[in-house]
Every structure is written in C-alpha cells, then in structure tokens.
Image (spheres, rainbow, N blue to C red):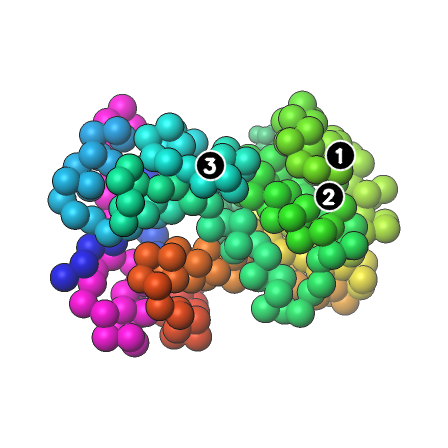
C-alpha cells in the first residue's frame, strides 16, 4: 500500500484526505492519504522520516510552505513563488512543487475564463497571493497586487513580471478596468466580511475567492449580485489536489469524483 499525506500544523480539519482517497478508490489504487502535524522545529526530521518510511508524496500547508523550500529540490516555479505545497519522494533528494499555481489557472480554465491579455487584480500578498500573482502573469494577464501591508504588495510585484503593487484603498480604481479578481486574503473566512468594497465590483469581472469556507463568501455573494462570474475556493483546492495527484501517480485524476468528495464536506 502506498502512503501519501499532508504536513501542516494544524491539519485537523483538512479536506485533502477524503478528496485524495476518493480518487484512489475510483481508480483502484491501493493507497492511503494521512495527515501529519510535526512540531515546527522538527520539520527537517519529519521530511527525513517520511523519506525513510517510503512515503510517496506529501502536500505541505501552513506553516511549512516556505521552510520546506530548503529541505527539498524545488522546481523553478516553487522557487519563483517561494513556497512548496507538494513534495514528490520519487526522486532523491525529493523534489518540491507548487500546485497552488495550477489551482488558480485550472479554476479559471474550468470556468472558461481566458487570462491572456486580461487585467487582473490580486488582493493579498501572502502564500495564496504569491501563487495567484505568478499564475495570472504566467497565463499572460497583467497583474496588480493590492495588500493591507502595502510594502508586501510592492515586494511581490517586483518579483512578478510586469506587475504593480498597491494599498487596499486603490481597489476601486484598479477594479474599474479589470477583468479578473482574486481574493487571496483570509478575509471572509471568519465573518461576513469582504476585502473589496461592493461599489468596486461589476458585471464584467470573473472573481475567484481562495477562501473555501464558507463556500459563498460575502465577496462572492456581492459579486454574484452585481452580475459577475464567481468561482469559489473549493475549485482552487480541488485543482491543486488534482495536480498533486497526477504528479505522484502518473494517472489522470478523476476530477468529478474528487470534487464530489470535497463538496460533500463543505
Ligand atoms: P497568509 O500567507 O497568512 O497571507 C494572508 C493574507 O491575508 C495577507 O496578504 C494578509 O495581509 C491578508 N489579510 C489577513 N487579514 C486581513 C485583513 N483583516 N484585512 C486585509 N487583509 C488581510 O495566508 P495564505 O496562505 O496566503 O492564505 C490566505 C487565504 O487563502 C486563507 O483563507 C487560505 O485558507 C486560503 N487558501 C486557499 C487555498 C485553496 O486551495 N482554496 C490555497 C491556499 C490558501 P498582510 O500582508 O497585511 O498581513
């Protein structure tokens, strides 16, 4: 039996085990997907241990996405983004990848939203913001990043080709001519709040919210009411998992089955 899993702290409520195990069941793969919560000071030992035990692949989440970079051989994209969310133990040393980037681009592709040549706004400059900004720029969009801590928006914009950094109060101006909006902050998760003023939303936007609980955040509700196309955070979660599954197993992921397993728990 093959073992895959998730490294994070905490990981108690993760939706990745049911999503991946639904895929193993659908394709008749003899595998389990388990969660691990190592002490943040012992992350290096955790990776060595996983390697020694023959674990095939690990996803990585908060607070380890950055610290794992120096413990594996990151590919170019993970290095650029500055975060690893997927480790592949098929190689020695194990390789590190960032499938959050594909999570963003495949979410838009699934909803037939073209990104090339479009104006995109990313709110947030943490891990999800970095993955979103690189994803949109790599897909040919011109990217503006707005963040509560403005200096982080500038830092990210400097790393992303053609991007610009802004404070949150620039959002109305940035969104007036935008086609695509990504919320990559945690605002909306713990209360009926939105990081974007409602007046800045309009019907020509496609809006992806990285927050997946609740599925319809205040931002998505208001965007839908304004006539925008809305994409919830479960799509991003699904496609980062699909991408990791395909890398590890070499099989085409049963996307609908994984989506069903995920949404059944949201
Ligand atoms: P992170 O690295 O801690 O970054 C958090 C971001 O949110 C920062 O830009 C921070 O701004 C901003 N922020 C926090 N509180 C805010 C507030 N009250 N007002 C305005 N901005 C605020 O976290 P992350 O890993 O990027 O995750 C962000 C969100 O994305 C979380 O909800 C996470 O669950 C979600 N996510 C979803 C997926 C998915 O697959 N759907 C994947 C990754 C993450 P400052 O820089 O000013 O602190």
Residue named by callout 3: 83
Residue segment shown in magenta: 17-42
Quick check: 131 above or below 149?
A: below
24 lies above or below 201:
below
Q: Nearer the viewer, residue 68 or 6?
A: 68
Is residue 22 covered in magenta? yes
* Camera sees residue 173: yes
In 3D space, how far apart are the residues under numbered discs 1 and 3 (Cα atoms)? Answer: 21 Å
Disc 1 element: strand
Q: Are marks 1 and 2 in contact (CB under 8 Å)?
A: yes
Q: Marks 1 and 2, Cα distance to the nearest angstrom?
A: 7 Å
Residue in the image at 20% along x and 63% along y: 31
Quadrant of the rendering where the N terminus is positioned: bottom left
Q: Position of residue 108 (x, y in %)?
A: 62, 62
Q: Which residue is mark 2?
A: 143
- Mark 3 or mark 1, which is nearer the start of the sequence? 3
Give the quadrant of residue 220: bottom right
> Which residue corresponds to mark 1?
164
Horizontally, is 69 left or right of 160 in the view? left
Residue 139 x %, y %:
66, 53
Q: Residues within 10 Å of mark 1 (few under 14, many from 20)?
A: some
Q: Secondary structure at mark 2?
A: strand
Q: Is residue 130 left or right of residue 15?
A: right
* Quadrant of the displayed image that contains ligand 1: top right
Q: Residues within 10 Å of mark 3 (few under 14, many from 20)?
A: many
Residue 162 is situated, as x and y percent measured from the top left of the image, at 75, 38
Confirm if mark 3 falls within 8 A of ligand 1: no
x 69%, y 29%: residue: 158
């Amino acid at each position: 039996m093959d073992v895959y899993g998730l490294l994070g702290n905490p990981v108690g409520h993760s939706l990745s085990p049911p999503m991946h195990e639904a895929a193993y069941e659908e394709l008749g793969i003899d595998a389990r997907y388990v969660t691990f919560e190592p002490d943040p000071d012992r992350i290096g030992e955790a990776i060595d241990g996983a390697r020694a035990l023959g674990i095939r692949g690990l996803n990585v989440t908060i607070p380890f996405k950055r610290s794992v970079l120096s413990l594996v051989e990151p590919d170019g994209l993970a290095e650029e983004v500055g975060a690893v969310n997927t480790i592949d133990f098929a190689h020695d040393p194990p390789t590190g990848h960032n499938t959050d980037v594909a999570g963003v681009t495949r979410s838009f592709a699934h909803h037939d939203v073209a990104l090339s040549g479009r104006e995109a706004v990313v709110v947030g400059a943490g891990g999800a913001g970095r993955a979103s900004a690189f994803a949109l720029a790599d897909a040919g969009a011109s990217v503006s990043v707005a963040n509560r801590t403005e200096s982080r928006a500038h830092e990210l914009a400097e790393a992303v080709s053609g991007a610009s950094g802004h404070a949150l109060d620039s959002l109305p101006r940035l969104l007036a001519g935008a086609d695509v909006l990504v919320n990559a902050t945690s605002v909306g998760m713990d209360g009926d709040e939105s990081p974007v003023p409602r007046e800045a939303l309009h019907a020509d936007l496609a809006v992806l919210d990285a927050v997946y609980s609740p599925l319809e955040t205040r931002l998505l509700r208001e965007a839908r009411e304004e006539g925008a196309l809305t994409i919830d955070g479960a799509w991003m979660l699904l496609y980062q998992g699909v991408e990791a599954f395909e890398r590890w197993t070499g099989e085409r992921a049963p996307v609908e089955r994984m989506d069903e397993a995920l949404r059944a728990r949201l």
